[in-house]
Image (spheres, grey):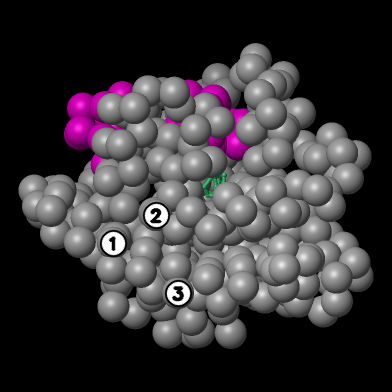
Amino acid sequence: MKILSGIQPSGQLHIGNYFGMMRPMIKNMDRGELYAFIVNFHAMTSVHDAERLSRDTLHAAADFLALGLDPERCIFWVQSDVPEVTELTWIFSTLTPMGLLERCHSYKDKLAKGIAPSHGLFSYPVLMAADILLYQAEIIPVGKDQKQHVEVARDIAAKFNHTFGETFVLPEPEIDDSVATVPGIDGQKMSKSYGNTIPIFCDEKELKKRVMAIVTDSTPVESPKDPDKCNLFAIFKLFAPPDRLAEVRDLYVNGGAAYGKIKLELYEILLEYFRAAREERARILADPGELRRILRQGAEKARAKAAATLDLVRQRVGLRY
Ligand code: ADP
Ligand code: TRP
């Protein structure tokens, strides 16, 4: 079974990315053939700063490895090192109905946030379909916000198969319901573009500031509160050991939950939870030459797979003459 997912190098990795995508991918290393990559072409829909894009590409790769991805047990590369994906994107563009893209929530949300509606932003799901189908991937672990994009990839695959003959397998999103949408410090979906994240690898002072800024209501400490309606509890729940979680839930239900104390405890837990990864990341980034070598090696493997699919596609559509 082929499992594939990618992450944009467009800002600091946060706990939503970790639970929604990175952790499921890392857990999948021995389940099948795993494809993990850094989607720098996609990041160009929001980043037009060469220095930042190139730095964040290496950082995103280091994040993945530091959190436990083993490049020997998967194919790990940077999207633009396999330029075949842009050719497949064009071929898919000629088949993709405008209406399919116009319906995408992610595009509409980004417009609502004031992001300039470039052609690349609009056709973002077509590039993502090419990412997935170029490797004939079957399972796509993502957070809930990406479900629709995987469905677009399915629709494009079906349309291609119908038009040119059976070529692509239809991919399926795989979403862990318990962490499908991790809330941000303001209670909306945690997202780099909402400025409401808890980054995993920022410095300790910044981490503490973010945790202390988690929005809570003004119910007094002694009053009972509903833990399932509290944003702080939703985040605490992701990290606290089960015994401690049960105690804190009790404090919410029976009174005595002090938000400030719980936030401090969460901060300490977070530091400990990612301590080893933080050290590993620093070690990886101290040797960017080695990191580039790992990525180039991954790109070679990915390219060989991509070339086989593209060869078949060219034949199917009539680009061979
Ligand atoms: P962001 O919204 O912060 O820009 P990305 O679009 O780069 O995040 O998402 C990378 C991966 O992380 C995707 O699989 C996405 O579904 C997942 N993800 C992002 N935010 C969350 C969240 N708040 N909860 C769960 N998964 C998330
Ligand atoms: N669009 C995804 C996101 O923003 C990233 C992505 C690009 C992706 N290509 C992909 C995810 C292919 C899964 C499979 O998170």
Image point (65%, 57%), residue name: 88
**Quadrant in which the N terminus is drawn:** bottom right
Left or right: 184, with 92 as reference point: left
User: Residues in magenta?
Assistant: 186-209
Residue 150, percent from left and from top: 71, 57
Identify residue for label 2.
Answer: 81
Looking at the picture, which amino acid does disc 2 mark?
Answer: Asp
Q: Are marks 2 and 1 in contact (CB under 8 Å)?
A: yes
Looking at the picture, which amino acid does disc 3 mark?
Answer: Ala
The mark lying in front, picked from 3 and 1, is 3
Left or right: 123, with 142 as reference point: right
Give the quadrant of ligand 1: top right
Identify residue for label 3.
Answer: 304
Identify residue for label 1.
Answer: 296
Q: CA distance from mark 3 to mark 1?
A: 13 Å
**Quadrant in which the C terminus is drawn:** bottom right
Q: Is residue 163 above or below residue 231?
A: below
Q: Does label 2 or label 3 sit earlier along the sequence?
A: 2
Q: The residue tagged with tag 1: helix, strand or loop?
A: helix
Left or right: 175, with 77 as reference point: right
Looking at the picture, which amino acid does disc 1 mark?
Answer: Arg
